[in-house]
Amino acid sequence: MNTKNRKLQSFIQLGLIAGILVFINILGNASFGGVALYRHLDLTEENRFTLTDPTLDLLHNLDEVVFVRVLLEGEFPSGFKRLQESTREMLDDYRAESGLLEYEFENVNQGTAEEINDRRKNLAEDGITPSLFRIQSTEGTEEKVIYPYAIFSYKGRTVPVNLLEEQGNLPQEVAINNSINLLEYKFSNAIQKLQLARKPIIAFTTGHGELTELQTKDLVVALRPYYELGRFDLDSNYQVPPQIDLLIIAKPTQPFSERDKFMIDQYIMNGGKTLWMLDKVAVSLDSLRVDGSSFVPRDFP
């Protein structure tokens, strides 16, 4: 093969490669009816990068736009850069399955000092708090404020999602990897919360030495995204409202009057549900005893 033919072949190969790259770029940005036409290729045996069936069902059943504000725009350390890119890729996958998901990335730390402070204040009111990280550079140590959150909005309701798993004693790289692995779960969980037409109502009873609001704070924080929560005093009411889906009796230390027991009984008889959080050692069984006898439950055919 002479030099002229070799050069021609090289030009043809170069042209083919360029054409393939252009085609991939066009395909990657193509959409039809608001739905992206591309899909990520998942070559892992366990399909780690493929959306699960429950997530697909969730996305296919959307009837209105889900809008996501991701507070991870800007310059970050390499670990957070990976979290940022993985978040973007996951949202692209969601958008590829449903044309009813839109997102934007926002830099919380951009603007004047007054604008930044106002923005941070508004976020704090919504329970969104920053993470502080120290970054080593040639000029010394710099503290950086990062908001690793995505805020999901749907039909006038919002749910903030903390993208960063608690680090604890784990190296930052491990915490970032754990966070990336949980993105799909957290995103689908947020959409599922937003789709609840009515949150079930849970009430904690009071008046019998039950756990205080401070003592149940962690439980309330965990339940609040899914349920309406409140406290209910049996002594000051004549019945347990049927609107209450679950009545929690959290570690009572004082006896229940016959009236209170009757109220709870009627609530249960009418389909109400109760959760008794009892200290097995401290609970008195006097109401189960008659003339010194004990009653043991048994199953009947």
Image (tube, rainbow, N blue to C red):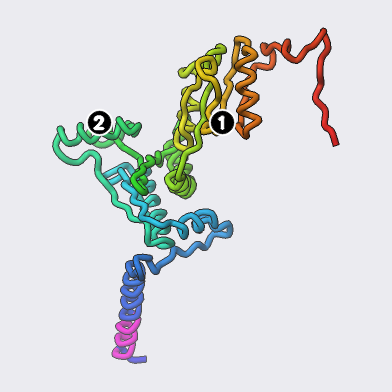
Instruction: Provide residue 167's location: percent of width, then percent of height.
Output: 44, 33
Is residue 158 on the magenta stretch?
Answer: no
User: The residue tagged with tag 1: helix, strand or loop?
Assistant: strand
Stretch in magenta: 4-13
| N-terminal-most mark, 1 or 2 | 2
Instruction: Provide residue 222's location: percent of width, then percent of height.
Output: 48, 32
- Mark 2, Cα crowd under 10 Å, few <14 / some 14-19 / many 20+, is some
Q: Which residue is mark 1?
A: 246
Above or below, 103 relative to 149:
below
Residue 130 vs residue 36, the one in the foreground: 36
Residue at x-position 38% and y-position 65%: 35
Please identify the dominant SS of the magenta region: helix
Return the mark for residue 121: 2
Q: Quadrant of the C terminus?
A: top right
Residue at x-position 41% and y-position 61%: 98
Q: Quadrant of the N terminus?
A: bottom left
Instruction: Provide residue 21's location: percent of width, then percent of height.
Output: 34, 72
Question: Is residue 180 among the parts visible in the rendering?
Answer: no
User: The residue tagged with tag 2: helix, strand or loop?
Assistant: helix
